[in-house]
Amino acid sequence: VNGSFASPGAIASGIVDVRNKNTQQGLLKAAGLRSVRQVCGTSISDASVAHFLEGERYPVVVKPAYKSQGGIKLCRTKEEAVDHFRRLVGSPEAGSGGGAGSGGSNGSGGSRGNVVEVICQEYLRGTELVVDHVSRNSRHKTCMVWKYDRRTANGAQRQVYFGMTPLESNSREVGL
């Protein structure tokens, strides 16, 4: 869009799909930053997926490479991770960046929002922070940092959001 209308913004060449959670972690790693240990695969029989699930400390997170609203699960055993991986592949649950049932492609060969790639990753313990930012002319500004409060409720295994708290830029957690 920027190139078509000569508007300021990112240069179209070299743009990667940053909605893909596997791509996001790869960009962090390429920049020399700490990234989560993970593998991305299309089948539970992929050697890298099998090796990861065999050797990783549990719990692990299993989720679609393209997250919209669902499909993320904290798996406490290898059997649970394998079952969830198999359930996700080909499902319409959370496949496309446009949201489940959006009719869009997830960019990985799937159509109608079906999950094609699944990520298995280490579980990071601690506080979950989400950073909102804007970019223009390759300059990036942080707009807001949120602290998420996610916990299990009512005996369910799945975590739910209890709330989000905006943090001051000079707070200890933000460290800007």
Image: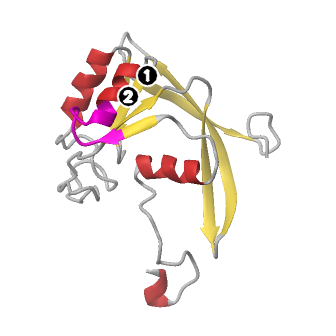
Q: Are there few (<14), some (14-19), or many (20+) residues within 10 Å of tag 1?
A: some
- On screen, residue 73 above or below 31: above
Left or right: 9 in relation to 17:
right
Q: Mark 1 points at which residue?
A: 56
Q: Nearer the viewer, residue 73 or 86?
A: 86
Q: Tell me the residue at 54%/27% (across/down).
A: 124
Q: List the single residue furthest toward the right.
A: 170
Q: Is residue 167 visible?
A: yes
- Residue 4: in magenta span: no
Horizontal and vertical percent position of residue 31: 62, 54
Q: Where, by quadrant of the figure, is residue 171 drawn?
A: top right
Q: Which of 103 and 52 is in front in this view?
A: 52
Kind of residue sitting beneath label 1? Glu
Q: Tell me the residue at 52%/36% (across/down).
A: 36
Where does the N terminus fall, quadrant-wise? bottom left
Kind of residue sitting beneath label 2? Phe
Do the CB atoms of the residues marked 1 and 2 lie less than 8 Å apart?
Answer: yes
Give the Cα separation between the discs numbered 1 and 2. 6 Å
Q: Which of the labelled discs sits on residue 52, or is there none?
A: 2
Q: Is mark 2 on a helix, strand or loop?
A: helix
Q: Tell me the residue at 42%/47% (across/down).
A: 22
- Residue 41: in magenta span: yes
- On screen, residue 66 above or below 10: above
Horizontal and vertical percent position of residue 157: 36, 16
Q: Where, by quadrant of the figure, is residue 38 drawn?
A: top left
> What span is in magenta?
40-49
- On screen, residue 119 above or below 16: above
Q: Are there few (<14), some (14-19), or many (20+) residues within 10 Å of tag 2?
A: some
Q: Tell me the residue at 20%/30% (across/down).
A: 86
Left or right: 65 in relation to 176:
left
Q: Is residue 72 visible?
A: no
Q: Which of 129 and 15 is in front in this view?
A: 15
